[in-house]
Image: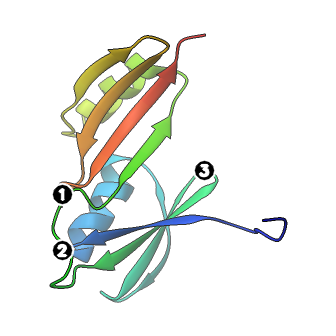
Amino acid sequence: MKNLKSCRINVMISNMDKAIEFYQSKLGLELINRYGDHYAEIKAADLIIGLHPLSEKVVQGNNLSIGFGVVEFDSTIKELESNGIEFKLEKDGWIRLAHFKDPDNNQMFLAERKD
């Protein structure tokens, strides 16, 4: 895919205001575009997260998983816990994971490689 310019993940959400508040206020990511309640774009380093309202065909939760690679794992968890995010921690040999969910129960995680 030599012509690939950018990538995005689209997240199906039930409430645009709550979703934007979660990504912007709780995770500290940047809202770069909002088109009413029809679509919004959140910037996360080199990734754009598109927020789309749910349709009847989409089941809440298990629509995707978004991973955020971090360097200072423990301090990042403490920072996000102070924003009300709850984690389930997991060690998997060479990687540490901290699983959490957005307001629509979509799966997310922090990851730190153990070199």
- Viewed as shown, does residue 47 lie left or right of 91? right
| Residue 94 or residue 86, whichever sits in front | 94
Q: Provide the residue designation for mark 2.
A: 14
Q: Amino acid at mark 3?
A: Ala
Assign the C terminus to one quadrant of the image: top right
Q: Position of residue 30 (x, y in %)?
A: 49, 60
Q: Secondary structure at mark 3?
A: loop
- Number of residues whose C-alpha sits closer than 10 Å to that of mark 1, classed few (under 14), some (14–19) or many (20 or more): some
Per the model, the C-alpha gap separating discs 3 and 2 is 24 Å
- Viewed as shown, does residue 37 lie left or right of 32? left
Q: Provide the residue designation for mark 3.
A: 45
Residue at 69% of width from left, 66% of height from top?
A: 6
Q: Position of residue 56 (x, y in %)?
A: 15, 85
Q: Amino acid at mark 1?
A: Pro
| Residue 17 or residue 59, whichever sits in front | 59
Give the label on residue 103, or none: 1
| 28 is higher (above) or lower (below) than 4 | above
Q: Position of residue 94 (x, y in %)?
A: 50, 13
Residue at 30% of width from left, 86% of height from top?
A: 37
- Viewed as shown, does residue 88 lie left or right of 47? left
Q: Amino acid at mark 2?
A: Ser
Q: Position of residue 22 (x, y in %)?
A: 28, 56
